[in-house]
Image: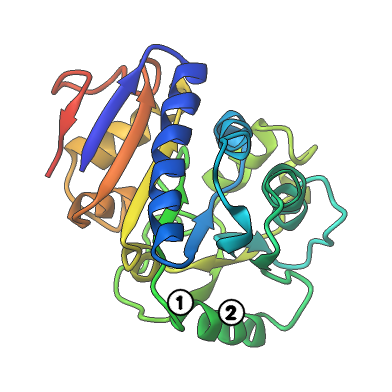
Amino acid sequence: MRVTVLPDQLSLARAAALEAAARIRAAVERGRARIVAATGTSQLAFLDHLTRERDLDWSKVELFHLDEYIGLPEDHPASFRRYLRERLIQPAGITRAHLIDGLGDPRAVCDELGRELRAHPVDLAMVGIGENGHLAFNDPPADFETERPYIVVTLDEACRRQQVGEGWFATIDAVPQRAITMSIRQILSARAILAVVPESRKATAVRACLEGEVSPMAPASILRTHDDTMLFLDVESAALLSRGRRGDYL
């Protein structure tokens, strides 16, 4: 895992966007790029910079959805389908996007998207890390074994409180209790993984990810097992690390 620490959130977003754009361009030059994109407040500046990258042929980019709440309509402010349409698909001009239907039958949705996803390798998975260490909506203890591309999960309280803290919901009772998420093994099957993790509220999870055991109790720690993972931090999210502010973690 390559770890890069930037002075602030803006420089983090710029650097991560440059790296992501370079990886996507390289895939497009081979014919097409298949990518996965994360959502949430931590990804806003990054996606803004990414969609403004020049000389990137988005018409050759195929997008897959990382996770979505079950039972949430697309017009809800917290809908990740809405988030991706407004902040990535429309600004970039992506024409091929496979979004998770949170109102459909969960098992059927998982099966259909899973078939599409497994048809060809993913070139770049762009992810975040949750305050509880989750990767996508794989809360601790995460399932490190399932081979299913998408699974149905029950969100833990810490995850649901994070959604309230970020302003997506007024109360924890309003946060759906279940979601569809890309599985851990499916995320790890991507050729490259780029994680964008700013802010002090992520510092504990970052330390567990990088300096604790690789464990389902710290789901993002599994990223250390991937051959091509790039983790972008700012000084706040890296504040609790003991091994310096930049380097490699295995």
Q: Amino acid at mark 1?
A: Pro
Q: CA distance from mark 1 to mark 2?
A: 8 Å
* Res 113 label: 2
Is tag 1's residue or tag 2's residue first in the polypeptide sequence? Answer: 2
Q: How many marks?
A: 2
Residue 62 or residue 27, whichever sits in front: 27
Quarter of the image where the C terminus is located: top left
* Res 35 label: none
CB-based contact (under 8 Å), mark 1 and mark 2: yes
Quarter of the image where the N terminus is located: top left
Q: How far from the left and from the top, in percent, is residue 46?
A: 54, 33
Q: How far from the left and from the top, in percent, is residue 110?
A: 58, 80
Q: Is residue 129 visible?
A: no
Query: Is 216 drawn above or below residue 230 in the view shown?
Result: below
How would you rate the neighbour count of disc 2 (Cα within 10 Å): few for under 14, some for 14-19, many for 20 or more? some
Q: Amino acid at mark 2?
A: Leu
Q: Is residue 231 left or right of residue 57?
A: left
Q: Is residue 100 visible?
A: yes
Q: What SS does tag 2 mark? A: helix
- In the rendered image, the residue lying farthest to the top is 7
Query: Is 222 drawn above or below residue 64 in the view shown?
Result: above
- In the rendered image, the residue lying farthest to the right is 75
The residue positioned 76% from the left and 79% from the top of the image is 104
The residue positioned 44% from the left and 36% from the top of the image is 196
Q: How far from the left and from the top, in percent, is residue 36?
A: 51, 58
How would you rate the neighbour count of disc 1 (Cα within 10 Å): few for under 14, some for 14-19, many for 20 or more? many
In the rendered image, which residue does mark 1 sit on? 149
